[in-house]
Amino acid sequence: MAAFWRRIPVVHLEAGLRSHDLAAPFPEEANRRMIGQIAALHLAPTPAAAMNLRAEGIEADRIEVIGNTVVDAVLALAGRTECFAEPALAAVEQAVTYGRRLLLVTVHRRESWGEPLRTVMHAVREVLDAHPDTVAALPTHPNPSVRADVLSVLGHDNRVVVTEPLDYPDLVRLLELSTLVLSDSGGIQEEAPTFGVPVLVLRERTERREAIEAGCALLVGTDRHRIVAAANRLLTAEQLPRAHRGSRNPFGDGKSADRAAIAIARMVGLPVMPMASFEPDAGLGVDEPISHIHPVINRC
């Protein structure tokens, strides 16, 4: 708003994400819609996001589909072998090396705190009990009440590692080691497909429906039965659905920052060569979508 008041052009990165519910995610959905009304250039991550903008009356020549720069970041960090910055995660890595499966759980949204968080923790407890070969990593919000809710259910299990919020390289490395992710994070829905890791989305709505439609994720909310049923079905499948790496991610191909730089240069009148817009692969990008593995749980 300050830039708009001073007549400074606003470029909106990650433009066009819409859950179509002002309360979820809060306050991001409202902020995105407001920025959409004042931005001079809209850098949409996907064709679907661009379609949302056009439906709101944004002119097509102010929209560029570039992919999501978070995929650039993930690909830049993928495959690194440096030690974890968080020492407790060394035990997780060792467990995976010895054949254990890793369940990564992140619940950080304020609307998930309290009873929804406790319900998710009990669901994780039930999943771990059903799968003795599985370990869990839970980067946890520093809020004392949040940490207390996590530890009250899972704090005495030696197969569970609870940490402070992670540095980004540590998070990417955990994703790379994971078998399954439970998360209410928007970013993880975009990051996990790079490694072919299915995500159970702990929300009732998502503004990143491309992950659902590509078969990379399922909406399960914070309902204990839905979480446990979906996780058990996936963990007992003969072979978990695995997306192909890198370019198969429906959110990006590692070239989003280049497209953004070119779009901004063109906006200010610099002579640059255009670059093709990002287009997700025509295929689903998974060997078998997880909605097929568990069609009852997928409410999309």
Image (spheres, rainbow, N blue to C red):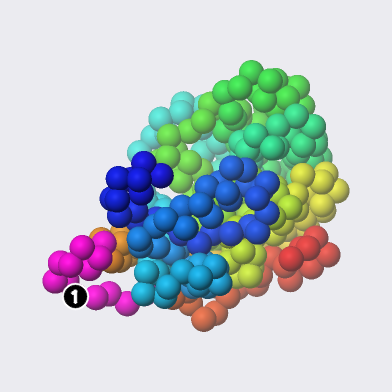
* Most frequent secondary structure within the magenta stretch: loop
Mark 1 crowd level (few <14, some 14–19, many ≥20, 10 Å Cα) = few
- Residue 142 in the figure: left or right of residue 264: right
Horizontal and vertical percent position of residue 113? 70, 32
Examine the image and state in which quarter residue 296 appears.
Answer: bottom right
**Nearer to us in this view, 167 or 79:** 167
Examine the image and state in which quarter residue 217 appears.
Answer: bottom right
**Nearer to us in this view, 118 or 155:** 118
At 58% from the left edge and 28% from the top edge, which residue is drawn? 141
Q: How many labels, in total?
A: 1
Looking at the image, the residue that sits furthest to the right is 225
At 56% from the left edge and 72% from the top edge, which residue is drawn? 55
**Is 159 covered by the magenta stretch?**
no
Horizontal and vertical percent position of residue 229? 82, 53
At 48% from the left edge and 41% from the top edge, which residue is drawn? 171
Q: Which residues are magenta?
A: 264-278
Horizontal and vertical percent position of residue 82? 35, 38
219 up-or-down from 110: above or below: below
Amino acid type at image mark 1: Met
- Residue 122 in the figure: left or right of residue 179: right
Q: Is residue 264 visible?
A: yes
Q: Is residue 182 visible?
A: no
**Is 271 covered by the magenta stretch?**
yes
Q: Which residue is mark 1?
A: 273
19 up-or-down from 152: above or below: below
Report the quarter where the N terminus lies: top left
Examine the image and state in which quarter residue 253 appears.
Answer: bottom left
Horizontal and vertical percent position of residue 239? 67, 64
Report the quarter where the C terminus lies: bottom right
- Residue 298 in the figure: left or right of residue 79: right
